[in-house]
Image (spheres, rainbow, N blue to C red):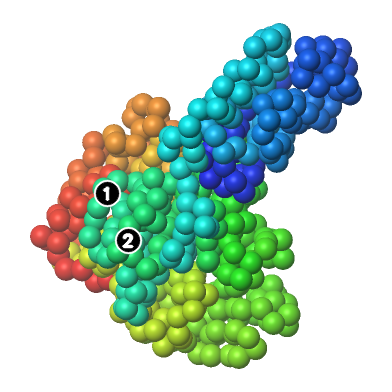
Amino acid sequence: MELVEIRDLDGPNIFLLEPAIKVELSWSDQDIGPEALADLARRSASLAPHLESGSGLDGLGHLWREIVAALHRQAGIEVPETVWRQLETAGRVVVAYGWQRRAFALEVAKVLAGLATGGELDPLTTHRLQSLLAQPATEQDQPAFLPDSARTVPIIAITGTNGKTTTTRLIVHILREAGRRVGWSSSAGVFIEGDQVLDGDYTGPTGALRVLRDAHVDVAVLETARGGILLRGLAYESNDVGVFTNVSPDHLDLHGIRTVEGLARAKATVLRVTRPDGYTVLNADDPLVVALNGTLRARSFLISRRHDNPHVAAHQEEGGATLVVADGALALTMEGIETRIVALSDIPMTFGGRAGHMVENALCGAAACLGLGLSAGDVASGLASFRNSPQQNTGRLNVYDIDGVTVIVDYAHNEAGLKNLLEFGRGYLGEGGRLVSIIGTAGDRTDDALRALGAMAANASDRVIIKRTTKYLRGRSAAEMDRLFQEGIKAGNGKTAPVEPSEQDALRSALTDTRRGDVITMMCIEQVAEVQRDLSAQGAPLS
């Protein structure tokens, strides 16, 4: 057995809804046989003299729990909740336990890892652990998260694969239009009442804590990505509204997550900590998301683009809250009362309902605000005044006209996002118009995912351009990514595509061979500001 990592998670996480220490190890069949587990029990006998070793992963998990408990008892501290879990990555297993003192808890992890990997127990272990507890607890020695006892403002947290940033921005807009003082963290930075205080991707606990610790806000809106959950945990003990937009394959084969089901479980951490008297907004059109209905401690608020969604109908019969599209409008059912909120034609971000994924985002954002207690009128007013403009929703379905050529810039970065972008773009084609797609994404995708992007673009477009990734290679080479895109494109239409060194260069290349009625769809994640500046100088925004 070998140690993979020891990680201190400062807040609720995929293993426990509290700060936890994660000890990940790799194992083989030899490591979980009766002889190996009996040897582990023997080497741990001075801690727990009557351990039953058993066999298999269950036997190993039992031993680990008992060793963790014994180490805490001998140190004179309460035994924490302890779990073990086999990861989706073959041959990997985790033991996780709650903690309140970092140095002590990490030392426990080192002792456990030492025993698991064949080491003998140090006779001075108990003394060393007691000494760590005897020292004053510093700020660095305590979990960096906000307990409910210290929380003073309501929290809306948004997770999912696609639509998180747009939904976050929409919620913020509705709240501010209703007179609330809002702080929010997102992939675009941290903002306090419209002023950016941190620049960059802050969808993890650092950005959330910056918002939660600011005295000028009365509502916190936190975009929450799976990376922060897996690497550090959430920044708070509970939220008042949790939103799950959707889930699809993205960022797989990272941190023990290999399937979309595993990804859904990780993201669901945001909903598992929603207060019992709060709401979890669930997309009833997504099977993995709506499957959480009835499994969470908070009330469910189902949203759907289909008024006849069977999950919605069943939830309404049980008295649950729903928000759906019916007869071209957002229709709310809450506490048995039906209310028409606003027509799709009066929600600019949906382009009259043509942008289906934006309808989904509008439903999620509206439900979150209703769940927090805003009136239907305030929500309708906010929806009517929010646009996919570079000013209000930069980089998300921003549409421009350049001499009869439509250019659509979007943060699409995975298959689901590209599919939505291409479908939306085809709706702008003029007579005889051609669809040109510019593709590219970050390097932390699987080989198959990159090939799939190429094939999807090739199948849907008349022309494909690859824009080279430079800022978000994340361990890959640009040449490797180009090759995988080309393999997908060739599988899709038998051709190859030109490669441009940047997003700006790709856009310039696309515009050199276009005519009225053509549409350019652009996956844009690295040079959003520069691309928008170029487009504003040449044409006019339509969104």
Q: Nearer the viewer, residue 248 or 507?
A: 248
Q: Residue at x 50, y 27 (%)?
A: 135
Residue under numbered circle 2: 215
Say which quarter of the image contains residue 482.
top left
Say which quarter of the image contains residue 213.
bottom left
Residue under numbered circle 1: 198
Q: Quadrant of the N terminus?
A: top right
Q: Residue at x 15, y 56 (%)?
A: 533
**Local SS, label 2:** loop
Q: Quadrant of the C terminus?
A: bottom left
Residue 198 in sight here: yes
**Local SS, label 1:** strand
Residue 285 in sight here: no
Q: Nearer the viewer, residue 345 or 157?
A: 157
Mark 2 crowd level (few <14, some 14–19, many ≥20, 10 Å Cα): few
Q: Residue at x 34, y 46 (%)?
A: 201
x, y percent for residue 63: 79, 25
x, y percent for residue 479: 35, 27
User: Which amino acid type corresponds to the residue marked 1 in the rendered image?
Assistant: Leu
Q: Residue at x 77, y 19 (%)?
A: 47
